[in-house]
Amino acid sequence: TQLLEQSPQFLSIQEGENLTVYCNSSSVFSSLQWYRQEPGEGPVLLVTVVTGGEVKKLKRLTFQFGDARKDSSLHITAAQTGDTGLYLCAGGRSGNTPLVFGKGTRLSVIA
Amino acid sequence: DAGITQSPRHKVTETGTPVTLRCHQTENHRYMYWYRQDPGHGLRLIHYSYGVKDTDKGEVSDGYSVSRSKTEDFLLTLESATSSQTSVYFCAIGTDSSTDTQYFGPGTRLTVL
């Protein structure tokens, strides 16, 4: 059972376009994290959101945590070729339970 | 740079041989994790540790064992490697299991022939 579903799985867009990727679950999470992974490297944290309805901005990236803390979205404005990579969401739960990762959205931004 | 190294970075081995992968951290973080990443499956947790000699199983622990005798080192052992264990293995560290950042190592590409 996949606790976190990411969509779309693959996305190919032209430089300058806007895009949104989604991370959905039927479970409630105490936190939601987004990571970006480039080929041959480990994932790197972009942001952590912990409050339902929270919106965080990181330059051209906007992250939102759903009001019910079951879903999240990542919006990229004016995509650049450097945004190309695998975007992973991960949900945090209480206690010693590790993060749950989605399978990721593979983004390709073409010049 | 989160101070995580993995060794070896690449390894080719034969079915049935034992293999040990090492993860070393310089950050003194409590939590350490081993994941494998495969196309179509994403990152899957193999084992994790929440302190020296405190470990627990993840979702794909069969065929793997771990040990943590020091805070800085977390070893992953494939007792008898199989072709299905061909994968990229990532180690990660964190100060809190549920909400804090996980810092990932550079990965080990393992091929089992």
Image (cartoon, coloured by chain):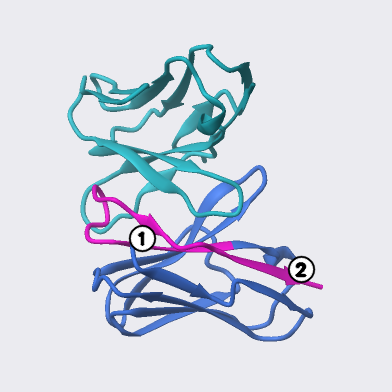
Q: Nearer the viewer, residue B88 or A44?
A: A44
**Residue at mark 2:** B83
- Return the x and y of residue A38 as percentages of the image width and height: 55, 45
- Give the CA separation, mark 2 to mark 1: 32 Å
Q: State the SS at label 2.
A: helix
Q: For residue A88, which numbered disc appears in the image? A: none
Q: Quadrant of the N terminus of chain B?
A: bottom left
Name the outermost residue toward the top.
Answer: A17
- Tell me what residue is drawn at x 52 percent, y 67 percent: B61
| Kind of residue at badge 1 | Asp
- The blue-coloured chain is labelled B
Crowding at dot 1, Cα within 10 Å, few <14 / some 14-19 / many 20+, comes out as few
Viewer-side label of 2, 1: 1
Q: Which residues are magenta?
A: B89-113
Q: State the SS at label 1.
A: loop
Q: Colour of chain A?
A: cyan
